[in-house]
Every structure is written in structure tokens, then in C-alpha cells.
Image (spheres, rainbow, N blue to C red):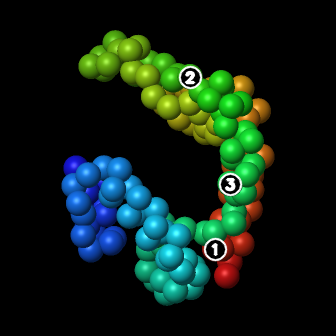
Amino acid sequence: KALAKYVRKVCGVSSGDALEDATRLIQHCKNATPPSATAFGPRKTLRHVLVRGCVSPQLLHERFPQIKGAYTQQALDYGKNSRYGDRWKISCYIVVLEKWKPKIMPHEPMVSALSDVVDMCCRRFEEWYLE
């Protein structure tokens, strides 16, 4: 449902078929010209944009077995008053902040698999932001 709504918003039309809509969205992204940060103006909120070439598809393809092997959902304990208690499992963290509550640590195998990719993305974001 959410994919169809987003595809309709971005591409103008949705077939309602997830695979077809995903293919349409990928094609749209391939053809889109990513804006520079200044295109939004100094007082406007920056939005998500596609920045081509930030991470090599070949690098991700080569790294995929390591990423897949490293992935595990990490349990978060929101405490006894949470409806989830210690059963909440979410994502697999590479970067965390000290002040996060509940406290969670980065998953070391995923850090090994992707920390250089995260660094590349951060450096590219900085370049884009300063354009």
C-alpha cells in the first residue's frame, strides 16, 4: 500500500503490483537528476535526494555475503512498563549514540562489514551539503 502510494506520488501512476511498481520506481530513480543542496534554497527543509556514485554497486555486490552473514536483529529492552518488554527486536546497528535509550551497542560483525561504506556516505553527504 505504502509503495503504491509513493510510486503514484513520484511517478504519477501505480499499477498496484509491488514488483511492477518497484521496477517503475527504480527506473524513475535511474532517470532522475539529483538536485544540489542549494536547489532547496537557504530556508527550506532539505529532503532526501539520490546521489549517484556514492557507493559502488560492485562493492555492495561483493560485500553482500558478509552483510547477510552479519545481520541479526538486536533486542531492545524498553523496560517492564513497555508493551514490548524485552521482546522488541529491531534492525542491526552499525552506528549508535551514547545517549540512546534503551542503550544498545553496535553489532560488531555488521560494523566490520559496512563501516567503510557508512564513512563513504557521510563524506559524500558532507560534499553535497556544502555545494
Which secondary structure lies at badge 1?
helix
- In the rendered image, residue 82, in percent from the top left (x then y), is placed at 30, 20
Image height check: is 107 above or below 38? above
Q: Which residue is mark 1?
A: 129
| Image depth: mark 1 or mark 3 in front | 3
* Alpha carbon distance from label 2 to label 1: 32 Å
Comparing marks 2 and 1, which lies closer to the viewer? 2
Q: Is residue 9 left or right of residue 78?
A: left
What numbered label is drawn on residue 72? 2
Circle 1 residues within 10 Å: few <14, some 14–19, many ≥20? few
Element at label 3: helix
The relative height of residue 118 versus residue 55 in the rendered view (above or below) is above
Q: Which residue type carries mark 2?
A: Thr
Label 1 – label 3 distance at C-alpha: 23 Å
Nearest-to-viewer mark from 3 and 2: 3
Instruction: Tell me which label, 1 or 3, sits earlier in the chain.
Output: 3
User: The disc labelled 1 sits on which kind of residue?
Assistant: Tyr
Name the residue rendered at 30%, 50% in the picture. Answer: 18
Residue 57 badge: 3
The earlier-in-sequence mark between 2 and 1 is 2
In front here: 40 or 71? 71
Front-lying residue, 54 or 17: 17
CA gap between label 3 and label 2 equals 23 Å
